[in-house]
Structures are given as structure tokens and as C-alpha cells.
Image (spheres, rainbow, N blue to C red):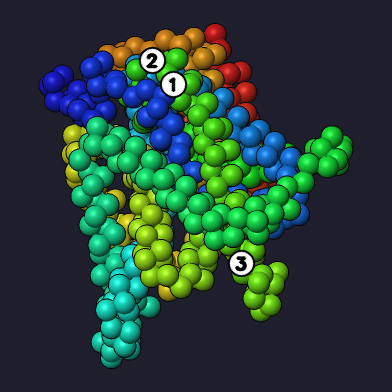
Amino acid sequence: MSQQKIKKTLINWDLVTVNPNNKTWDWKDLFCFWGVNIQSVIGFSLIASLYLIYNLNTAVVLFGTILGTFFVYIFCNLIGKPSQKFGLPFVVLLRSSLGFRGAQFFGLLRSIVGIFMFGIQTYFLSKAIGFLIRVLMYSVDNSILQKEILLVFFIGLNIIDWAAILISIMLQTYLFSVGMNYNKKLIKFSALIIYAAMIMFFFIVLLSDVKLTAQSFIDVLDFQNIFNPNNVGPIITVAGTTFTFFSIIILSFGDFSRYVKNEQELKKGNLSLILNLIIFSFFALFIVTGADAFQNLNEQNVEMILTNPTDIIGKLDNILLVSLALIFIIIASASTNLIANFIPSQYTLINFDPSSFSLKSASYVIAIFGFIIGVFWLTFLSQVGVLSYIDTIGAFFGPLFGLMIADFYMVKKGKLENKDIYSLETNGTYYYSGGWHLKGVYSLILGFIFSASTIWNTNFMFLQSYSWIIGAFVTAFVYYLLARE
């Protein structure tokens, strides 16, 4: 095989160094990036639940969530810097730590988790679309939903559900396969429109009864006994929960930081995560407490606090507001799916077979498997405990992070041979043992064992919120001992 043909197997235009002219992201773009990551139904419910359901001191939740996001900030700076410096996605940088074969197969784990979560998120996205279709149909004819054709179900879905899931798959695939410049526009649009929506609903709730809603918000604030030593445990728990929520983003953050102008913009932009958390928490808490205050006016609803935005929407009797809220949920869910699942899966699939996959063909693979997962999620996959196995695969993510950080900063001292990152020559820097860096693989497996034990060993399940960090530190430590000169 000629040298030219050999090199083609590792080179793909979507994996090469970003042209400096295309490094256009600044801190404002990263502000929108982190905004999208927190502006989800799950994010809304998590924050509202932490403040309202678990009877925790307000200061404990605030400090715990900020502490958790601070660790996310630190780790994203660490993993984002090499990608920003060299303009490479995370999975290409992984070649320097694991070899090209190691990066192909261990990087593919990110695709497996990403595609599976994309399918699940698409299912819930389709539920919002289906709900919107039903609302609009009902507003035209309140008897149409009782038509016989709409009462026929196949695999737990009727014709509206099938239409909704097809719309969600096709729309996401079409929008997400254009390229990163277009993705940046989608991210900015989504972040700004969702914040605008939250401001709108904030004022709707507030102006419904200023005194009642303001007082209900004030009543949940509790800053007493802030410095009580008993608060240390809850703070650590909240911080771990918050970190876990964002952890899926950290490993593949380089897929986005490669487009950032410079390191200063990267750090400023990542710091905006904490600002996003505070802003979003305020709006979420106020909307939930305000809505709950009105709910409690009805004696049947006392002590039934709703923290899920879809549940809150279900209590509205204004079709226009319901429709708007559903549109905003659809936008938020789709953009979160783009960042957390679709883009990382695209890059890792392309890296698995660079000579065969393109951005569009990888997108079609994600769409096909995502559609199958979405269709069978409710009736089969959610019933067989498949998420435990996905969590087990995800237990590699912390160790992969620890390996890359130890390798780049402590072993290779921030150096990278860019030409060898695409080379299959036996004397190449990253060829190692037939494309496998065995020291990296050993370290990774050991870190995975520690991380996965918090999922499957009942004695360690209390550490599950910290499994990502445990795996990262074990792998980093072992790899440094093995690979240092």
C-alpha cells in the first residue's frame, strides 16, 4: 500500500486542525454554549428539585451547585486548552494518549453513549412535538382527537406519535449535519430565545399576583445556619450531583473549544457557566414557586409542588401559552441534544473510519440508530434496565479524561507532533504497539474498574455521583507512574 493511501485512512477534513480564520468563537459564544447545556427540561427539574424537594438550606444548594460547576469550569479549561491550541477534536487528541487504534475503539464508546442518549432525548422531544400537534388539533376541533384512526397504536405509538418522532429525527438530522458554523448559530439562537422565554414567563407569573408570587419566592429562601458543620455533607452531595449533570460534556468539550479564538476567551467563556447557573436557577425557582402558589389556592393541589416544566404546562388553561411553552421546550431539548450527543458522536464515528465517514454520513448513522432507540424506548428499552449498561460504558469517560490530562500536561509537557497524529508509519510518535499505547490502556482499564464499581457494587453506590472524578484521578495517577520518563 502506498504512503499516500495509508495516510488517507487517518485523515478526514472534519478531523484536521481548524483553520485559524475559522476560530471565531469568543466568550459570548461559550456563554450561549453553557446556557444551552443548562436550559433543558432535566436541568430545570434538577435545579428546582434541589431547592424545593429535599428541604435543603438555600445557601447549601447555591454554594453546592456553584462548587460543582466550578469543578466543571476547571476540568473544561484543562481538556479544552489542547484542542483550542492545536484545533483538534478530543478523539484525535486521544490518539496521542492511546494510539490510533486505541482512539478508534475507546473513542467509539463516546458514540455509543451519545447515540443512545440522542435516541432517548429524541423520544422525549417527539412527545413535546406530539403534545403540540394535539393542542393545535384540539383548538381547531375538540372532538378530532377521538377519531378512530388516532386511537390505533403500534409499538405504543399512534399516528400522531409516529409523525412526531419522524419530524424530530428528520429535523434534527437536517439541521445538525450542516457544519459547525451553522451549529454555532443554532446554539446562540437557542440560548437567547430560551432566556427570553424564561423572562416572559417570569413576568407572566409575577404580574399574575405580585404579592403572592413574590412572597412565595421569598418564603423558600433560607440562609439560616449557613456555617453549620452539618451542611458540609449536603454541600458535597449537591456539588457531586451538579457535576454529574454536566460530566457528559467535559470529555468532548474539545470538539467545541477547537473553534475558540484564544485561551483567554476560553477561560472567560467557561466562567460564564457559573453565571448561567445563577441566572437559570433564579428564573426556574421563581417560576416553580409562583406556579405552586397558584396551585395551592386549590385545596386539592396542596403539597403537590411541580418541578417538571411539562407538568406545569399541563396545568395551564391558555392554549397560546401552552403552545409557546412547548415550542420553547422543543428548541431547548433539540439544542441540548446537539451539544451533548450529536456532535460528539459525529466526530468519534468519523474517527473510527476516517476514509469512509463524512459529517453527513455519520449524521445519517446517528439518525437511524437514534430513531430505532426512540421508537423502542418506552415499550422495551426502558423496561429492561438498559441505562445501567449505558452508565457502565459512560464509566470510561472519567478515566479517558484523566488519561488525556496526565498525558498532555504531565508526560508530554504540552507538546504534540501534529504530523504524526495522522501517521500509520511504524516509526511515528503515536504508533506505539501496532496502534495501541499499552500503558494508556492498562491505566484506563484500572480507572474504569474503580469508576464502574460505584454502579454495580452495592457497597460503593453511595459514591456514584463521584465515579467520574474517581476514575479520572485513578487513571491519571497510574498512567503518570507508568509513562513518566
Q: Residue 279 occupies which quadrant of the picture?
A: top right
Mark in front: 1 vs 3: 3
Question: Which residue is painted at 19% across and 43% down in the image?
Answer: 360
Q: Quadrant of the C terminus?
A: top right
State the separation of the CA atoms marked 2 and 3: 48 Å
Residue farthest to the bottom? 148
Mark positioned earlier in the residue sequence (1 or 3): 1
State the separation of the CA atoms marked 1 and 3: 43 Å
Residue that numbered label 2 is attached to:
262
Q: Determine the secondary structure under disc 3.
A: helix
Q: In the rendered image of this protein, does residue 108 appear above or below residue 390?
A: above
Q: Nearer the viewer, residue 405 or 324?
A: 324
Q: Are marks 1 and 3 in contact (CB under 8 Å)?
A: no
Q: Position of residue 290 (x, y in %)?
A: 60, 58
Q: Residue 182 occupies which quadrant of the picture?
A: top left
State the separation of the CA atoms marked 2 and 1: 6 Å
Q: Residue 179 occupies which quadrant of the picture?
A: top left
Q: Nearer the viewer, residue 272 or 284?
A: 284
Residue that numbered label 3 is attached to:
294
Mark positioned earlier in the residue sequence (2 or 3): 2
Q: Nearer the viewer, residue 185 or 359?
A: 185
Residue that numbered label 1 is attached to:
266
Q: Amino acid at mark 3?
A: Phe
Q: Are marks 2 and 3 in contact (CB under 8 Å)?
A: no
Q: Amino acid at mark 1?
A: Leu
Q: Give the left or right position of residue 142, taking residue 472 as reference.
A: left
Q: Give the left or right position of residue 435, taking residue 80 as reference.
A: left
Question: Which residue is painted at 61% across and 18% down in the image?
Answer: 481
Q: Position of residue 424 (x, y in %)?
A: 27, 22
